[in-house]
Image (spheres, rainbow, N blue to C red):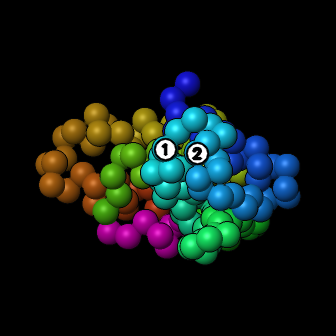
Amino acid sequence: MRISDSVANYILQMLNDENGIAEIQRNELANTLGCVPSQINYVITSRFTPEQGYIVESRRGGGGYIRIIRRSMTKSDLIMHIVNSIGPKLDAASMRAMLRNLVETGVASESDAHLMMAGLSDSALAPAPKEIRDQLRASIFKNMLLVLNV
């Protein structure tokens, strides 16, 4: 297992144990997991984003902390939040992260997510010119999400 996966799993376990709120000290967590503090930052900024349903607060300095809060949202709220966060273009990695979040929160089934990933993959969009694929992916994904919201 990669160190980033270990860090993410550790934080997710804290969120589950603490009713959706994890408060960590970066250096302490890095020592516990045997990694450097910058790896903690990377995991937090890439896996605990507002698009994935998290709020991250931090306080710097001695006694500083990073607080991660899992936002509880209704299915409709979460879908609309994701639709509104997509913007005019969407790369494949961001789309996969959003789908992973939808599956983890129970908004989409594994089979729904697999179908959406297949339909929005670079290979599925290959007939379109490269310069418009991310734009096309964003438009199609928004429409798929709106159907999930019904």
Nearest the eye: 117 or 59: 59
Residues in magenta, as a range: 81-88
Residue 108: in sight, yes or no?
no
Residue in the image at 85% along x and 49% along y: 17
71 on left or right of 96: right
Q: Alpha carbon of mark 1 to alpha carbon of mark 2: how far?
A: 6 Å
Disc 1, disc 2: CB below 8 Å? yes
| 60 in magenta | no
Left or right of residue 141, residue 66 in this image:
right
The kind of residue tagged 2 is Ala
Q: Nearer the viewer, residue 61 or 45?
A: 61
Q: Residue 35 in the image: x percent, y percent?
A: 52, 39
Q: Nearer the viewer, residue 95 or 55?
A: 55
* Mark 2, secondary structure of its residue: helix
Q: Which mark is residue 36?
A: 1
Q: Position of residue 120 (x, y in %)?
A: 38, 44
- Residue furthest front in the image: 62
What residue is drawn where x is 54% and y is 55%?
A: 44
Q: Please tell me in which quadrant of the rendered image residue 150 appears.
A: bottom right
| Magenta residues, dominant SS class | helix
Q: Residue at 33% across / 52% down in the picture?
A: 91
Q: Is residue 82 magenta?
A: yes
Label 1 crowd (10 A; few <14 / some 14-19 / many >=20): few
Q: Position of residue 26 (x, y in %)?
A: 59, 55
Q: Residues within 10 Å of mark 2 (few under 14, many from 20)?
A: some
Residue denoted by label 2: 30
Look at label 1 and name its amino acid.
Answer: Val
Residue 39, above or below 49 = above
